[in-house]
Amino acid sequence: MSDLRRSLLKGMSGIVADLYGEPVPAARTATLKSADAPVPARQPALPPFCKLWKTADETIDWTDILVSPTPTDGLTPPDKWTLYHQHAANVLKGDMTAYLAVLQSANPMEDLMPYVTALDVATVDADVLRVTFVPRQDLLEKEADQYLCGMALRIARDLFAALPVLQVDVIAAQEEQSLLTVSFTRSAMNKVRFAFIDPVDFVEKCGGVFPQEKYEA
Amino acid sequence: MAPLISKWHRELELFSAVKPLIILEGNVLDQCRYPVEGSIPEDSLVSLTEYLNGYLTDNGYGQVVFYSNLVGFMNPYSPASLTAFARQNGCEVKSGAIPAEFKGNTQQTAPNIIRRAMASTAAATAVVMELASHYIITPERMDQHDVNSFNLLMQSAMSAATVRTPMGKRQNLLILLVSKLNDLPAWFYLNNPLCKTIRIEAPDREERKRLISGKAWPTFFDATVYRTDMPFYEAHPEELTRLREKFVGLTEGLTFTELDAMRRLSKQEQTPIRELCAIVDLYKYGIKENPWANLSMDSLRTAKQDFEKRIKGQDAALERTLDVVKRAVTGMNGLSSSSTAKPKGVLFYAGPTGVGKTETAKALAEKLFGDESACIRFDMSEYGQPHSDQKLMGAPPGYVGYEAGGQLTNAIKKNPFAIVLFDEIEKAHSSILDKFLQILEDGRLTDGQGNTVYFSETIIIFTSNLGMYVKDELGRRYQNVTMDMDYAEVQKRLRQAVEDHFKLELGRPEILNRIGENIVVFDFIREEAGQAILKAQVDKIIRRLEEQKNIRVTVTEEAYQELSAAALADLSNGGRGVGNQVEALLINPLSRWLFDNAVIADADVTIEHFDVAAVPPCVRCHTGKEAECTKEETRHE
C-alpha cells in the first residue's frame, strides 16, 4: 500500500514538474529542513513607502459611538465598537488619559511599525498630539525626504482619524538629532486629495523644518 | 429626558393587543425615530422594518418575519427568527429567505404560509408585509388569484392564535405596510372588525425637536467639532435652545430620511455647531452661503432712498415693502407662526396700473440679491385655464410635458433665493390659488416629478388691479377709486375691494388670511410724482444721446413746460402713461428732426418748442453750429 502511495506521489511530482517546469516546492522546503541549513533572518516584506501617505485608517466616528452601544454603521466589528464606546464620552470631553487608552487599545499605528525603528506618541493637551519617531537607517539612505515626509503625513492622518484632536506635531529624530519637525493641523488636512500630492511639498506647506541637509549616516 | 412616543406607535402598542390585522399607511418608506431604549438605542433613526423588528421582539414576539413579494419571507435583523419560522411552518430557507409567491394555489404561497403561522401557538408570531401597495396592479383590476390571496390573509387574521410568552399573552399579528390605503381592496379593510388602520405622518415639530435635542444630538457633528464647540453651549444652554428651535422651524415638513441626510451632511462638512442651520440651506439648495445672511445692513439703511430713485410718489408702499424685508433680515418673520419654513415675506400689491408695482419688485430683487433677474415674474393672465396649474407645477407622470417639469418649480429650483412675482393674480384660475396656499403655509411645493422645491428663502409678491373697478347692484362696472381721492381713501377702498374679492367672489378667505396685513396699496401717480417721473425720463434720454452719439440736447425752460403740461395732462395711466407721452412728444419728434437734418453725431441741439397739438407732434430745435440760430420745424408733409 505504501509502495503504491509513494509511486502515486512520485507520479504527481512528475506532473507538477511538467506543468511548472520546476520541482514541487514542498520537496525543496523539506530538503532545506533535512539539511539543517541555517535560515537567514527574515526582513519584513514591506510595501514601498512611496504609497504610505496615500492611505490612512478609517475615521472613528466618536459621536455615533457615543450614542449607541452596538455598531450602527454595519462595518465596525462589535468588539471594537464596544471598546470605543467605553471611551467615547471621555474622548469627546478631551480627556488625555482616554486618548492614550484608545491609542493603546486600538493601536492605530501598528501597521507603520515596520517602517520605523521606534515611535512614541504623547499628548500635549486635548487639542494636540506629539509623535516622535526614529527612522530606519536603510530607508533613510534611499529617498530620505520622501520617506520622512510620507511617514510624518501618514502618522498624522492615522491620528486625526483616531482622535478628535486639532493638531499633530511629528518629529523625526535620530541619535538626538532632529531630522524633521512639522505640525499638521486638521483644517489643513481637510479635503486634501492625498493620492495626488507630493508629501515633501505638503510638509513644506505645513511649515515643516528640515534641520539637516543630508540624512545619510 | 422622558421618552417621546409618536402617536402611531402608541396606537400600535394599543391595538396590537386587540386586533390581529394592522395596516400601517402613509409615510412607511421613511425612517423612524426609535422612542424607547431597547434592542435599538433610544432616538436612533432606523427603517420602519427594523423599528418593527425591534419593537415586536422586545415585546415578546419570538418570531418576526418580513414578507416581500419579490424575495419572500426574510429577517435581515434576526436570521434565527426566520429559521425558527421556517422550521415551524414547514418551509425551507434559501439564500437567507423563504421564497414564496403572493398568488397561487399551492400550500407554499405566502398567504398559505401566513395562515398556518398565524394559527400556530408554538411561538408568538408577527408577519410584516412590506410594500403591500405593490402586490396587485390596482384593487379594481384584481383577478381571482389576487382575491383568493387577500381572502387568505383575512382568514389568517380571523384564525390568529393567542400565544403564552414569558412577557404575557400575545396575539399573532399580521401587519401590512402601504403607502396609500386605497392600494388595497376596500373590502379587505372597510367594515373589517379585525383590522385597525394606523396612519404614519411625517415627523411633527415635537419629533424633530426630540431628534435634535435627544440622544442623537452629538451624531449631528464631527467628533472634533463636538469636542471643541460643545463646552460653550454647555455653558450657554439658552444659545443651544435657540439654535435647536431655529433648526426645528427650518425643517418643517421634512421626513426623517431627509433629516438623517442632513445629519450626515453636517458631519461630512464638519459644520460647527453654530452653523447647524446652514446645513438646511446646503441640503435644500446645495449652497451654504445664504444671500440673506450676507445682506449689507448699510445698503438696507439707504434702501428707501435708492428705491425712490426708481419709484416715484409711493412713500407708504415702499415703507411697507421695506418693513417686510427688515422683518426677514432680523429673523422676526417666523415669530408669529410655528413654521420658519414659510417664505421670508408675502406682499400683495394693489393699486392703479402703471404706478410702480412691478418696478418695486424688481428694485427689491436688485437690492437684496444684486440683480434684477432674481425677480422671477409670472404673468398670471397666462394661467387662466383650469389645467394651468400643470404649467406651473409640471404635468403628472404619463402626460405630455412630464419631463419638462413645472415653470414655477423649475425656476425656484434654479434660483431658490429670489423674489417671486405673480403679476395680475386676479387673472389666474382659482384652482391655482390652492397651490399658493401650500406655498404660503408650508413654503414648499412638489412638482409632477416628485421633486420638492422650497420657498423659504423667497419673498412672494402678488400684484393686482383689483378694486379699481367694481360692479354696482345692476352689475354695471364703475370706477371705484379716482385721482381726486386722497391716498387714505384709495387705500381704504382698494383694501376693501381685495378682501371682498377673496371672501365674497372667490369664497376663499383662507388665502386672504395667509396674506395677512401685507396688502400694500399703491397710490395714483400724482402731479408731483408725475413731474419727477418726467424729469427722470427726459434726463435719461438726454444722457443716452450724449453717451452714444455725443449729441448734447438742451431743452429750454419754456419748451420743458410745454412738454410737462402735455405729458402730465392725464395721469390716470400712471408712470407708464407718462412714459408713453414722452415717447410720443419727445423721442419720436426729436429722432425725426435729427434724421431730417442729418444730425447723426457730435452736435449740440436745443429744443425750443414742443408742438403737441400737431399731428404727429413735432419739435422745433436748432443746433449749436447754426450761428444765426436758424429755426427749423420738422413736420411731415
Image (cartoon, coloured by chain):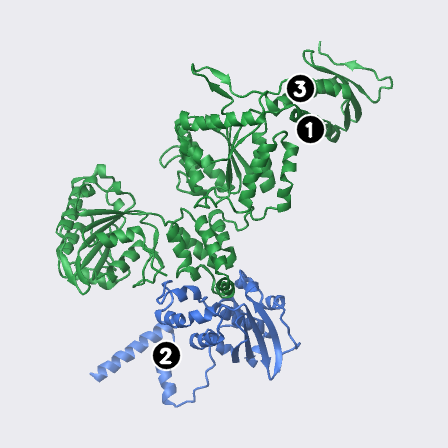
> Three-letter amino acid code at disc 3?
Ala
> Three-letter amino acid code at disc 2?
Pro
Drawn colour of chain A?
blue
Q: Are marks 1 and 3 in contact (CB under 8 Å)?
A: no
Residue position marked by numbered label 2 in the rendering: A25
Residue position marked by numbered label 3 in the rendering: B567
Residue B232 % position (x, y): 52, 63
Image chain in green: B
Depth check: give the residue in front, A11 or A141.
A141
Q: Quadrant location of the C terminus of chain B?
A: top right
Disc 2 to disc 1, C-alpha distance? 99 Å
Residue position marked by numbered label 1 in the rendering: B536
Residue B379 % position (x, y): 50, 29
Evaluate whether residue B53 shows in this view. yes
Q: Chain of mark 1?
A: B
Going from N to C along the chain, the mark reached first, 1 or 3, is 1
Disc 2 to disc 3, C-alpha distance? 108 Å
B613 left or right of B102 in image: right
